[in-house]
Amino acid sequence: MAKYKVDITGINTNNLVVLTNEETTKLFEQLRKGDESAKELLINGNLKLVLSILKRFNNTKYNMDDLFQVGVIGLIKAIDNFDVTLGLRLSTYAVPLIIGEVKRYIRDNTSVRVSRSVKDLAYKIIKYQDEYLSTYGIMPTNAEIASYLQIEEYEITYAMDSLKDPMSIFEPIYNDGGDTIYLSDQIADTKDINTDKDMLISLRKALQKIKDREKDILVARFIIGKTQMEIADSLGISQAQVSRIEKNAIENVRKLI
């Protein structure tokens, strides 16, 4: 699959029709007169809009065929509720509805469970954003959302973050000269050491035999609990260098133990 291309099973995206504003307006007039075939033409004429939105979800673990079907549901809701008298483009009104529908699907199918109240608040925020956008043509500010829902602004960020896909701690985030740095390398180790005394004695002896810089980095990482970035800043070296020294130090300690 190409990086910026969304492939949908059974659909040749190159042959999809894109309606002009004039064609869209005429079809809505026909739909108001009871011509249901106009609705199908409106849906088919805006499928590329759904595909363009799905590009931002192209790197997720979810099946793009499923997301496409969910996005089309958002498009249909937009067509059913669109008011041509407001002077808005259908795409302007449909985009937040399609995005909201896709995010809800992802949220409901994620392995991380968020409390029901947070989930409901996120839905209320999206609904208010959709209504505000359809009325005023712009997205509301966090202050306006907080005022309307009678919540604190930080609750908006917390609720909307619950819709995001979780990231593995083994996700690679940086590579320098072949030394990959993973998300876990950015996380401070704050857990207590709870092991048997013989292992602690062996570890202490091993630490006395490795290089001072290796020992200092291991102590900072796994006893003090600093991140590799914090250690790099204090030593005046790159994080990649810290990662390299840490891995060598662990290997040397393992051999000595």
Image: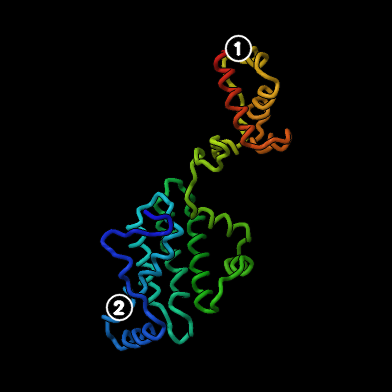
What residue is rendered at 67% in x and 27% in y?
A: 217
Label 1 to label 2: alpha-carbon separation: 74 Å
Residue 25 x, y percent position in the rendering: 39, 85
Residue 9 location, quadrant: bottom left
Quickly name the residue at label 2. Answer: 41
What residue is rendered at 48% in x and 62% in y?
A: 123
In the picture, the quarter occupied by the C terminus is top right
Q: Is residue 248 left or right of residue 86?
A: right
Q: Is residue 247 left or right of residue 164?
A: right
The amino acid at mark 1 is: Ser
- Residue at the far front in the pictured view: 177
Marks 1 and 2 close (CB-CB < 8 Å): no
Query: Which labelled disc corresponds to residue 214?
Result: none
In terms of depth relative to the viewer, which is nearer, 212 or 190? Answer: 212
Q: Is residue 170 left or right of residue 68?
A: right
In terms of depth relative to the viewer, which is nearer, 243 or 85? Answer: 243
What residue is rendered at 30% in x and 78% in y?
A: 41
What residue is rendered at 41% in x and 79% in y?
A: 82
Looking at the rendered structure, the number of numbered marks drawn on it comes to 2
In terms of depth relative to the viewer, which is nearer, 16 or 53? Answer: 16
* 176 over 92 or under it: above or below: above
In terms of depth relative to the viewer, which is nearer, 172 or 127? Answer: 172
Helix, strand or loop at mark 1: helix
The amino acid at mark 2 is: Leu
Quickly name the residue at label 1. Answer: 202
* 196 over 154 or under it: above or below: above
Residue 6 x, y percent position in the rendering: 37, 59
